[in-house]
Amino acid sequence: MGRMTRPAAACAAAVLLTAFAPALTASAAVTPRIDLRVLVLDDHGPATAAITAELDGSGTPYTTVDLTASGRSRIDAAFLSDTVDGRPRAKYQAVVVPNDNPFGDGSAEMAALTAYEKKFGIRQVDAYTYARPAVGLNPPQNPGYAGSLDGRTAKVTPSGAAGPFGYLDGAVPFEDNDPGVTESYGYLAVPLERQAEGATYTSYVDAPIPGSSARGSLVGEYAHDGRRELVVTFVYNQYQSQFRLMARGIVEWLTQGIHLGADRNYLAVHVDDVFAADDRWDTELNCTPGDIDCGTAGNGVENDPIRMTAADASYAKEWSTAHGLTLDLAFNGGGSEAYKDENGGSDPLAQQLVTDQGSFRWINHTYNHPFLGCVQDTTVVPWTCATTLLGTTRYVGLTDITGQISDNLTWAGRQNLAVDKTELVTGEHSGLKTLPQQPNDNPNLSTALTLTGVTSLGSDASRERDQRTLGPATTVPRHPMNIFYNAGRAAEQADEYNWIYAKKADGGSGVCETSSATTCLDAPLDTATGYASYIVPLESKIALGHVLANDPRPHYVHQSNLAEERIVYPVLEKTLGAYEGLFADNTPLVNLRMKDVGEELHKRGAWDNALAAGRVTAYRIGDTITVTARGGTQAPATLPAGTQQTQTGNATAFGGAYAGLRSGWATPTLGRITFTLPGDAVPDDPSAAAPALRAAAPADRLPVPAGVRDPVPYGPGDTSRG
């Protein structure tokens, strides 16, 4: 990634601060109050939905007006502003509109919105609009382009890097997941050579115009008539990586770098079954001998289980150090004892990992990895829950559950292994409800968690995405990577992948043809090359999608994937390499341990509930921001560098540096939080001497291709985009 020199970085920071600084009306006798809330005028299009999703994900308060509803609120002066305690109040700090003029010719609503933005220095994002003189651009012709942007690479301009997109390293690639579907559409156009009096257009992201040496703007700032618009001339949805890359910059420009809510890029990787051995996929039987679902097919078959070696452990340490990513090892101490019983009383793997224990984080995965939900009846495939004579479900008992948790901690203590006893991942996430066989949690699990002091419990995000409470514990949903527990070699992984995702006519199971949660392969993968050519890029793209979505949930794989051919590393390396090529050094990956992920999700949930219940108010007057959060709810915020937070009379620097700003959680004192912005973050209003307002014609209806309306999945295993 590129690095700035110290003087250049300081200059960029100053430009960034100025670009994001709020504007005040110089002629106002009383400094106005600006409420920290975004207004979204929603046309039900994918672009406004994408920006709304970004606000939701970061916890930034907003109000939506459905422009398609017959009884909607009218946009007029009374809706936009009023007076509080004798002080003019702007009810919204920023405005998102579907395009530069979503109302009719001569609309009173657009006139009211325009006057409001000028009076209070409020910025407007045109979520998707046509390139035309009304937004400071030439029509997309001579030179220009209108059409598909699939597979093209845009670039952050020097102005974008010095302003709202300074967290990016430069390149902004556009997706092309299906050559048969248009997934992106937009307009590439150059700014007007002669702008209206006092108007300027500054391009922030552009791309080459086909058949020309010129570059056309895709995102830029149009300053005119005492107002500022962020003009976006391509359409997108909330899942597409090009939007995810630019979402932060769009919101920071919109809010002038001052808003509630925070957005960071997270990546944590859990490795399950450490010290145990995982059964191996059988490429002839198309199942895993020893696994319940293999039934009698595997009877008499030597399974040849997969287990890490001491050399694999040393490699894991070296890899983790070299790539700056600490792995979380979810361990089963009983697996080491079983290995010693069968191999002369020693376990080189355990010896190596215990020696290098400080290079990893450790999670209790139970002693022997048993199923801790209902008692399984394995005489049928798929298995069912055993029942009593009265027909009630039989569950694994409390003594068995607490024994598995405690015995593993006791084993760790004998090895002097540093483990946080508050964290637990049960085998197969068992004990938690497992559909369709076990629709309820094991009622003994919550009591066992209480007795053993567990407060963070791993769960499967593909089953339960949201966090929930079980006894004293909150769940930490984990994303399963589609790298199978029963594969230590690339050919095994590709063979099983074909069985799951190939059509029945192509030799697969055909499950993909009957399940709405998966898609089918066009053709089976070559087992010799398919892992590297298809699965690695696909899985890294899915993982990167989670990273770009401000999603702290960990990913999980298994120790088998670190053994033999060590097939997980190419996926992680491709993910990390892609990230490094996209983001500047001021925006590093955040690698949290499990309980900290749980705490982050818990605070987000409490914050979202407080917003929904109307328990939060926040506003800025001059350089002072006041947040009232009743009930002691912690508040997330993103603010300029140099911002001070005042608590009990003491002022301290707020938050942590990230993406060129400061962000973090603030705890209220007596229900209130006060921030003071640095002096240079509140410049004079640039619109004081602006020319008279000009009426603009409404934007034409813009094309939205099918690949934007209905997100195109990356491929099999990608269930978040379909």
Image (tube, rainbow, N blue to C red):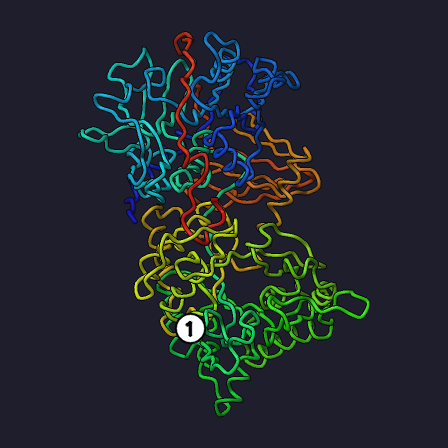
Q: Which quadrant holds residue 200?
A: top left
Residue lying at 65% horizontally and 52% vertically, measured from the top left:
468
In the rendered image, the vertical position of residue 295 relative to residue 20, given as above or below: below
Image location (x, y in percent) of residue 317: 40, 70
Residue lying at 36% horizontally and 46% vertically, measured from the top left:
583
Residue 72 visible somewhere in the drawing? yes
How many numbered discs sit on the rendered protein? 1
Give, as a three-letter code, the residue at label 1: Glu
* Frontmost residue, 530 versus 266: 530
Residue lying at 59% horizontally and 78% vertically, measured from the top left:
413
* Frontmost residue, 535 versus 139: 535
* Frontmost residue, 299 versus 110: 299
In the rendered image, the vertical position of residue 577 relative to residue 700, given as above or below: below
Q: Which quadrant holds residue 496?
A: bottom left
In the rendered image, the vertical position of residue 125 relative to residue 173, given as above or below: above
Which residue occupies the extreme bottom position in the image?
Answer: 344
* Frontmost residue, 489 versus 224: 489
- In the visual, does 696 lie left or right of 148? right
Image location (x, y in percent) of residue 677: 50, 33
The residue under label 1 is 284
Which residue occupies the extreme right position in the image?
Answer: 390
- In the visual, does 21 lie left or right of 532? right
Name the secondary structure under disc 1.
loop
- In the visual, does 124 lie left or right of 470? left
In the rendered image, the vertical position of residue 278 relative to residue 635, given as above or below: below
Q: Residues within 10 Å of mark 1 (few under 14, many from 20)?
A: few
Residue 9 visible somewhere in the drawing? no
